[in-house]
Image (cartoon, helix red, strand yellow):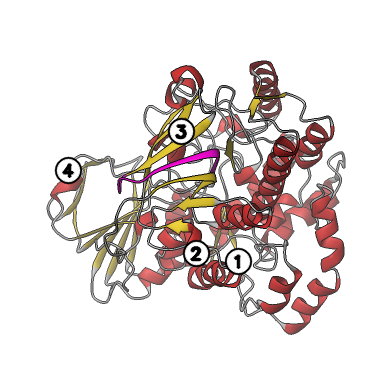
Amino acid sequence: MSAAAKTPDRAPVSSKVDAVVVGAGFAGLYMVHRLRQAGLSVQGFEAGGDVGGTWYWNRYPGARCDIPSLLYSYTFSDELHDEWKWSEKYAPQPEILNYANHVADRFGLRSAFLFDTRVGDVTFNEATKRWTVKTDKGDTVEAQFCIMGTGCLSVPKEPDIKGHEDFKGLKIVTGRWPHEKIDFKGKKVALIGTGSSAIQSMPIIAAEAAEVYVFQRTPNFSLPALNAPLADAEVAAFNEGYAAYKEALRQGLPGIPLPPEDWEPNAEELKALTESLWNGMGLLSLSSIPKITRDRRINDAAADYVRAKVKELVKDPVLAQKLTPGNFPIATKRACVDTDYYVSFNRDNVKLVDLNDTPIERITAAGVKTSDAQYDVDILIFATGFDAMTGALMKMNITGRGGKSLRAEWAHGPRTYLGLQVAGFPNLFTVTGPGSPSVLSNMITSVEQHVDWIMDAIVNLRAKGKATMEATPTAQDAWVQHVNAEADQTLYGEANSWYLGANVPGKPRVFMPYVGQNYKIRIDEVAAKGYEGFQLAG
């Protein structure tokens, strides 16, 4: 696997700034923009070679957003909205990366970042009430505020199958896809995993490769993208309602028509709702079914509809059964959005290896050995997901008040107040952190909401002449209890998902996102009450 192009070696940086921002994805870019607008000095760090965050790294074939492009966009600038035109209903990775680059160039954000630079130590100094940030390039930067825009899906789960170091062919992790094009023509390919990256990439790889072996442990629910070029009329209709859409988001509303949560659809209405799962709206169609993760009757109807569709699409009934999810409720693992995933199994060159029947014993120099066969391949692809939501934060050595380590504080699962701060870590903010809707929401919308909230909090703190803002242990305990209580009322606990950290050996099993209602309204009320649950001091 080749690495991305690296920036030239540089001398270490030593400086003092108002704020450090970690990550140059959509969160980090907007955070830098808001800080600069407020007149604060800022230093950004990014492990990648340029801006883009997850879209810089995830370049695998077929990578694209899973909600419509028109919604997967910033709303903070009307000029940006007017000048950027998406080409497809679901934008592909290169176009999303171009969008991130356009934003960075248009607002002059790239100069704030040091690229190819990983943050190692982040330490709070109680005497100066400032954070000291150190990197793998020898940089030392002191700042009053430290904002983590490190992303929820930014640390790929490393291959942990015995013998993976022995493979002699090309080995690729989807979350770190090579920057150059991979030629699959005439090649035999092993694809381990059936999450989103595998489901998006397999049909494209199969159209080119000689053989594709898909190694599946758990079949996934996937909905059709029915992707197409964006029609002018569709864009015009969206733009006509854009002002109302933005205002709805500002008020903490979805911005798109959704049924009321207390609606109890009758049998005929439920049938119509489930049939909408095949209308090409992807994850939005799941959101349009009320209480889908809370009501067994509703969930079963939706899941059964998708299962029936899988059996229609896959010609071999035995194979169709193996590809049909059966042991967890729909939407309790992140559903996927695909183009021709299921029908690709009708191809002669695509083979499913069911690991429940024949588990992998080891990776060999030539390929993959299961309990009953050896699969010799030229290319081995690990589509095994991410250390989600906490992975990037836990890779850094973050030390707060009294030498308190974030790793130790989160040894039994992440604990935050509102998903924005951690008690004992003053002026350290997490954008879309655990304990917030994050991965269950439109990520760019949630990023904007968090960045705006954090910026308002910083301005408030400085206006009052205070040095630090810190979540109180009492408020954090109450929020964690509330997050858990909301999760306990859902069906999410019935799936071994990355929402729970179940895909990473040794990771605590804690449901990390917030599934309650009116999240933005809640955090805005906290701010309106003088940042209730936070202590302002110094």
Q: Quadrant of the C terminus?
A: top right
Q: Which residue is mark 1?
A: 225
Q: Work out whether mark 2 precedes mark 4 in sequence or the reverse, and give the earlier one.
A: 2
Say which residue appears at 84% left-offset and 35% top-offset.
528
Q: Are marks 2 and 4 in contact (CB under 8 Å)?
A: no
Q: Nearer the viewer, residue 139 or 333?
A: 139
Q: Is residue 99 magenta?
A: no
Say which residue appears at 86% left-offset and 41% top-offset.
264
Q: Work out whether mark 1 precedes mark 2 in sequence or the reverse, and give the earlier one.
A: 2
Helix, strand or loop under label 3: loop
Q: Is residue 211 left or right of residue 507?
A: left
Residue 161 in the image, given as x and y percentages of width and height: 25, 41
Q: Nearer the viewer, mark 1 or mark 2?
A: 2
Q: Is residue 537 left or right of residue 123?
A: right
Q: Which mark is residue 502?
A: 3
Helix, strand or loop under label 1: loop
Q: Nearer the viewer, residue 15 or 227?
A: 15
Q: Nearer the viewer, residue 383 or 395?
A: 395
Q: Which residue is mark 2?
A: 110
The boundaries of the magenta stretch are 136-148
Q: Is residue 131 visible?
A: yes
Q: Work out whether mark 1 precedes mark 4 in sequence or the reverse, and give the earlier one.
A: 4
Quadrant of the image occupied by residue 506: top left
Q: Nearer the viewer, mark 3 or mark 2?
A: 2
> Which three-letter amino acid code belongs to the residue tagged 3?
Ala
Q: Which residue is mark 4?
A: 163
* Cα separation between marks 2 and 4: 41 Å
> Which three-letter amino acid code belongs to the residue tagged 4?
Gly
**Chief secondary structure of the magenta span?**
strand
In the rendered image of this protein, does residue 263 appear above or below residue 496? below
